[in-house]
Every structure is written in structure tokens, then in C-alpha cells.
Image: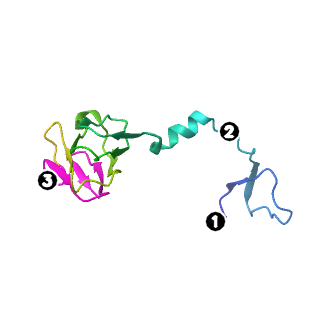
Amino acid sequence: MGRRSYKAFIPANPPAAFVKPANGHMEWAAPPVVTPLTADDIKKTDEASKIVKWGEDRTAQTDYHFIGVDTTSQPVTITLPRTADIPSGKILLIKDEAGNASNNAITVTTSDGALIDASPSVILHSNYAAINIYYNGDGWSIY
């Protein structure tokens, strides 16, 4: 039995030392078409562009990613979005940006009975504390 033929896709400008593969059928590939990114495209790929800062109790919206909390004057409760409204894999970072959580704690809670690592809420009470959480399809997990 002889060898079977195959196709080799060769770049448009092959190196000078290029040797055609044995039993190969060559097709010259066109150079890839590159479309430059616009400013809107770049902004869409940067989830960190959705940063909010609060100094009062709030419910996080489904498109939030980073939540900076100002604990200067009062404790703050951040309520997570309803799990029915977010996809599995949603990530949130909540941070005490004022550095006063030891005096004014940040409570992170759910609105729909979902749990955060088997608990209905988490309290941040260390200055400059932060929590990274993600929704895994069943509940929120801290990482």
C-alpha cells in the first residue's frame, strides 16, 4: 500500500528553504484579514471598566465587576444581584477602599436566598479588606 495524499497549507510568503512535503497537495493560504479594534471594542473587553464606588447600602447590578466601598461614615451592606439574572461564572470583587471597615463593617448578602460559601452573608471587618466571589450556577463561592 502506498502513502495517502494530504493537503499542506502554506503561508503566502514561505521561507526560501521551504520544501514541499512528499505526496502533498499545496494550497497557498491568503494572509489573514486583520480588523483594527475600535475604542468601543477595547472598552468591551475590559471588564474592569465597570467600577462603582458606594458609601451607602446598595444592590449590585448584573454588569458590575468591581465594587469599591467607602466605609468612612457608616457601615455598608452590598446585596448581590439575583442569581436568576446572572450567568454561571459571574465574578465580583468588593473592596473596602476607605480603609475603615474595622469601625464600619461591610456586609455582603444575597437577595434571593442564594448562599455565599454556605452562609447567607459575609462580613468584612478588617481595614482595606476585600472579597473575590463568583457565581458557580448553584451559589456564590469565595476565592
Which amino acid type is marked by label 2?
A: Pro
Q: Residues within 10 Å of mark 1 (few under 14, many from 20)?
A: few
* Label drawn at residue 1: 1
Instruction: Please state which of residues 2 and 25 is positioned toward the viewer in this rendering.
Output: 25
Q: Mark 1 or mark 3: which comes first in sequence?
A: 1
Which amino acid type is marked by label 3?
A: Ala
In the displayed structure, 67 sits above or below 39; it is: below
Q: CA distance from mark 2 to mark 1?
A: 50 Å
Q: Mark 2 or mark 1: which comes first in sequence?
A: 1
Q: Classify the position of the C terminus by image quarter.
A: bottom left
Q: Classify the position of the N terminus by image quarter.
A: bottom right
Which of labels 1 and 3 is toward the front?
3
Query: Which span is picked out in magenta?
Result: 116-143
Q: Which residue is mark 3?
A: 118
Specify whether residue 120 is painted magenta: yes
Q: Which residue is mark 2?
A: 36
Q: CA distance from mark 2 to mark 3?
A: 46 Å
Q: Position of residue 27 (x, y in %)?
A: 75, 48
Disc 1 element = loop
Specify whether residue 142 is painted magenta: yes
